[in-house]
Image (cartoon, rainbow, N blue to C red):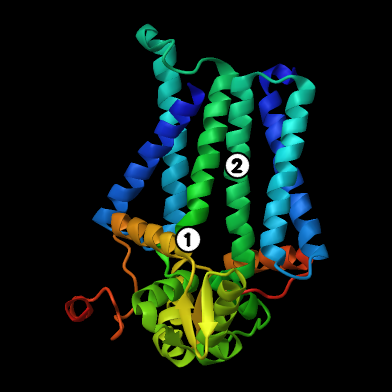
Amino acid sequence: MTILVSGLLVLLAFLVHVAWWRVKKPKAPNRAVVLVFFGCLVLGTGMLVIAERTCPALQGYLPAGLVQWTQVLVLSFALAAAYIGTYPAIEVDSPTVLIVDLLDRAGPNGLSLDEIYSTLNDDVLTLPRIADLLTENLAAEIDGKLVLTHQGRSLAALFMGWQAMLRSGKGG
Amino acid sequence: MAGGFDWLFIAVAGCACDVIVYVITFRLSSRARHSRALLAGACGGLAVLSAAAMAIGIALQNFAVAILVYFCFAYTIFHVAQMGQTARRVRLAIELAAAPAGLTRSQLIGRYNAREMVDRRLARLIHGGQIRLVGSRYYLFNSAARLMAAIIRTLKIILKSQTSLPELATDRHSPQQRKLS
């Protein structure tokens, strides 16, 4: 029962997410997708708990007790986190997916490196991501120069720490 | 045991083991570090979770919840680890962090640009067997990669996310090419 209720809550949150995006995609979509999922899950769980307590007809069809409701919350948050982790690959054009798409479309002719470079250039791959940093308030533009905001510095510090722990390169 | 929250403790133990094994395997590997570390972390975490579940004699439903939570977490760790290695925004932010006085767009592109992005990904795709370089041309080799691209395209259609990919003259899916073939 807890698994079914968790799945339904996440599905509901996903439908709200799709409906919102189809009406008007938010300006800061990464932040919005986190808000919509966790907001829907917290609200949805709260409403179901109240329904289970106040409506005897629903008892037996819904989870009961602190342990089961905690399972619902934790599992639905985990499912939501899995989708939110996938979302950036859907929201932006992943270069890997673009390369695979390009090669799929080229078919048996394949593509040369120059053809790939000329199609996947800075206008397609780099400038939109720089624009995202500004839109998501991770960077600001001051006198023609890009500087990190406090949020951007926190993000950079987090991943630099992660890369230092792994002893890996800068990535990208 | 643990007031009925044993499933949560074993899920957390499995997730913690996943991260620890991932970091250790990544540091010790010289090749295919990311994929080896992900696999080792996922297996290690699952082993710890299963062993803990057997040791405490957890109820089947609680074990099922713990396993699902663990898999979602392992999948999320895959994406977070992937972001740390491949996300362009993360790399751009790191380049800006190294220049507190700020960088112009040209300066930032000078440090990290489309060519480096393409070169890195081509190398990964060749190493992973998804594409091949024959002579001087690249070809798609793996149908799983094609399936992944199709799933992403479908989700983009559902969410009405536009792609910025320009049309190719050699696009075999274009109406002109379909007429010729």
> Callout 1: helix, strand or loop?
helix
Q: Using the image, determine if residue A128 lies above or below residue B142.
A: below
The quarter of the image holding the N terminus of chain B is: top right
- The image shows residue B135, relative to residue B178, as above or below, that is below
The single residue placed furthest to the top in the displayed view is A56
Q: Residues within 10 Å of mark 1 (few under 14, many from 20)?
A: few
Give the vertical position of B141 relative to B156 (above or below). Answer: below
Q: Can you name the residue that lies furthest to the front here? A: B181
Between disc 2 and disc 1, the foreground one is 1
Q: Chain of mark 2?
A: B
Where does label 1 land, which residue?
B144
> Which residue sits at x=57%, y=26%?
A70
Return the residue at label 2. Answer: B71
Expressed as whole percent of the image width and height from the top left, the position of residue A142 reads 51, 83
In primary-sequence order, the first of circles 2 and 1 is: 2
Q: Secondary structure at mark 2?
A: helix
Is there any visible trace of residue B137 in the rendered image? yes
Q: Which mark is residue B168?
A: none
Q: Residue at x 72, y 43 (%)?
A: B45
Q: Please, what is the three-letter code of the amino acid marked with disc 1?
A: Ala
Left or right, B25 with respect to B68, comes to: right
- Image location of residue A67, percent across then percent down: 60, 20
Residue B153 placed where, x, y %? 35, 62
Residue B79 falls in which quadrant of the image? bottom right
Instruction: Tell me the quarter of the image containing the C terminus of chain B.
Output: bottom left
Q: Position of residue B126 (x, y in %)?
A: 58, 75
